[in-house]
Image (tube, grey):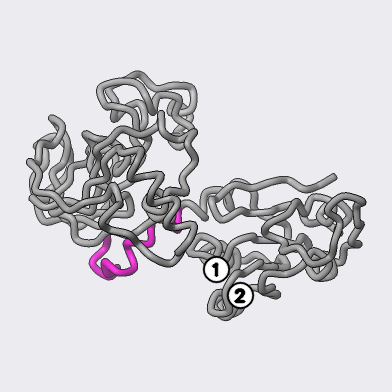
C-alpha cells in the first residue's frame, strides 16, 4: 500500500528547520524527511484492521515537518512511522471476540497506553487517565505515545491501518466524516475544560485561536458557561471565527497594555524589558495576570490549563 512515511534523518530535519525559518509558509518536499512510499501492511496480532477514510493534519504533524518540534520529544517516538492520528476509518476485519464488525465506521483513539502494550496498568491507566500513561516507551510496542509516531502502530496517512480493539469509537450514520475527523482535537479541548470548568463570574483567557482554541470557545458556550471569554488571536479570520463562536472579546496580537486593559488589570513596567510594544504571545504576562480580577482559568492551545489565582 502507499503511505506517507516520516523517517529519522537529522540532516533533513535541520535543513527543513532552517528553510522554514526563512520561508515559514512553505513546505520543502525535496528535503523533508516525509516521503510517499509503497510499504507492506503488517498489523499487530489481535488488532482491528481498518481502511482510512479521512485523516486530519495536527499541529504536531506540521511542527515536525517544519523542524519545530522539541528535541526532548525524540525518545518518545520511533521512526520510520506513518503519520496521522486524527483518523476516521472503516472496519475491514476484526477478531471475532473484539466486538467489532466489518463495515462499521469508527474514529481511532490514538493513544498507546499500557493495555495496548501488553502491560499491567500503571497508576494512571488504572484511573483511566491514559494520556498520563507511564509506559509510552515500554512493552510490546516501540516508543511512541500515539499512532503516527510509532514505527509499528502506523497512522492514518495510508490506505490501511490497524488499531487495538479498545481504541475505537463507533460513529453514528448522522455524523459525516468531515465532522467526525475533528473529534480528536475536540477531545483535546474538552477534557481540560471539564477538569477545570470556570464559574460564571470568572474570566477565561485563551491564548491561541487555532482549532483547539476555537473548540474551547464553543464548548464553553454549549456547556452553558456564562464566563467572560477573551481570546488572543494572530490573524483577522481567527478573530471573526472567535466572535462568531461566542467569545466576548477577540484581541489581535495585543500589546501587554491592551491585554491588561481588557482584563481590567494594571500594567506594571519593569526596568529590564519593560517596554509597551512587545507582543503578548512573545513575553511573560504573569505580572498582568497577577493583578487582574479573578482570571483563574487560562487554557493554552495544547489543552493545558494554568491556575492564575494569586
Q: What element carries label 1?
A: helix
Question: Residue 192 location, x and y as percent?
Answer: 57, 48
Q: Do the residues labelled 1 and 2 touch (CB within 8 Å)?
A: yes
From this view, report whether residue 266 is shown above or below residue 78.
below
Question: Residue 2 location, x and y as percent?
Answer: 11, 52
From this view, report whether residue 76 is shown above or below residue 163.
above
Label 2 environment density (alpha carbons within 10 Å; few <14, some 14–19, many ≥20): some
Residue 246 shows which numbered tag?
Answer: 2
Question: Residue 119 location, x and y as percent?
Answer: 32, 20
Quarter location, residue 93: top left
From this view, report whether residue 30 is shown above or below residue 130.
below
Q: Relative to 128, is 272 on the left or the right? A: right
Q: Relative to 225, is 160 on the left or the right? A: left
Reading the chain from its start, which is encountered first: label 1 or label 2?
1
The Cα atoms of the two marked residues, 1 and 2, are separated by 6 Å
Question: Residue 302 location, x and y as percent?
Answer: 53, 51
Label 1 environment density (alpha carbons within 10 Å; few <14, some 14–19, many ≥20): some
Q: Which quadrant is home to the C terminus?
A: top right
- 173 inside magenta stretch: yes
Residue 286 shows which numbered tag?
Answer: none
Q: Identify the residue shown where x is 13% and y is 49%.
A: 37
- Asked whether 258 or 31 is in front, the reply is 31
Which residue is disc 1 drawn over? 218
- 169 inside magenta stretch: no
Q: Relative to 259, is 193 on the left or the right? A: left
Q: Is mark 2 on a helix, strand or loop?
A: loop
Q: Relative to 179, is 127 on the left or the right? A: right
Which stretch did the figure color magenta?
171-187
Amino acid at each position: 500500500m502507499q503511505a506517507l512515511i516520516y523517517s529519522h534523518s537529522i540532516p533533513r530535519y535541520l535543513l527543513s528547520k532552517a528553510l522554514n525559518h526563512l520561508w515559514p509558509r512553505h513546505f520543502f518536499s525535496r528535503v523533508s524527511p516525509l516521503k510517499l512510499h509503497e510499504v507492506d501492511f503488517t498489523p499487530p496480532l489481535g488488532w482491528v484492521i481498518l481502511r482510512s477514510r479521512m485523516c486530519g493534519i495536527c499541529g504536531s504533524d506540521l511542527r515536525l515537518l517544519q523542524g519545530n518540534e522539541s528535541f526532548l520529544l525524540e525518545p518518545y517516538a520511533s521512526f520510520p512511522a506513518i503519520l496521522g492520528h486524527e483518523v476516521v476509518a472503516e472496519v475491514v476485519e476484526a477478531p471475532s471476540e473484539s466486538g467489532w464488525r466489518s463495515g462499521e465506521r469508527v474514529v481511532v483513539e490514538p493513544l498507546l497506553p499500557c493495555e495496548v502494550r501488553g502491560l499491567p496498568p500503571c497508576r494512571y491507566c488504572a484511573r483511566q487517565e491514559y494520556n498520563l500513561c507511564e509506559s509510552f516507551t515500554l512493552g510490546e510496542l516501540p516508543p511512541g505515545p500515539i499512532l503516527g509516531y510509532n514505527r509499528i502502530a502506523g497512522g492514518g496517512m495510508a490506505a490501511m491501518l490497524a488499531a487495538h480493539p479498545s481504541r475505537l469509537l463507533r460513529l453514528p450514520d448522522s455524523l459525516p466524516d468531515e465532522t467526525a475527523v475533528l473529534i480528536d482535537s475536540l477531545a483535546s479541548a474538552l477534557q481540560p475544560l471539564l477538569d477545570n470548568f470556570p464559574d460564571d463570574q470568572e474570566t477565561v483567557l485563551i491564548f491561541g485561536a487555532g482549532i483547539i482554541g476555537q473548540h474551547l470557545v464553543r464548548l464553553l458556550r454549549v456547556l452553558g458557561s456564562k464566563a467572560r471569554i477573551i481570546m488572543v488571536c494572530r490573524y483577522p479570520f481567527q478573530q471573526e471565527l472567535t466572535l462568531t463562536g461566542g467569545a466576548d472579546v477577540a484581541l489581535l496580537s495585543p500589546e501587554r497594555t491592551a491585554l491588561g486593559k481588557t482584563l481590567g488589570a494594571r500594567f506594571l513596567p519593569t526596568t529590564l524589558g519593560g517596554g509597551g510594544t512587545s507582543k503578548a504571545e512573545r513575553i511573560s504576562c504573569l505580572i498582568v495576570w497577577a493583578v487582574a480580577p479573578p482570571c483563574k482559568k487560562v487554557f493554552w492551545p495544547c489543552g493545558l490549563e494554568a491556575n492564575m489565582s494569586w
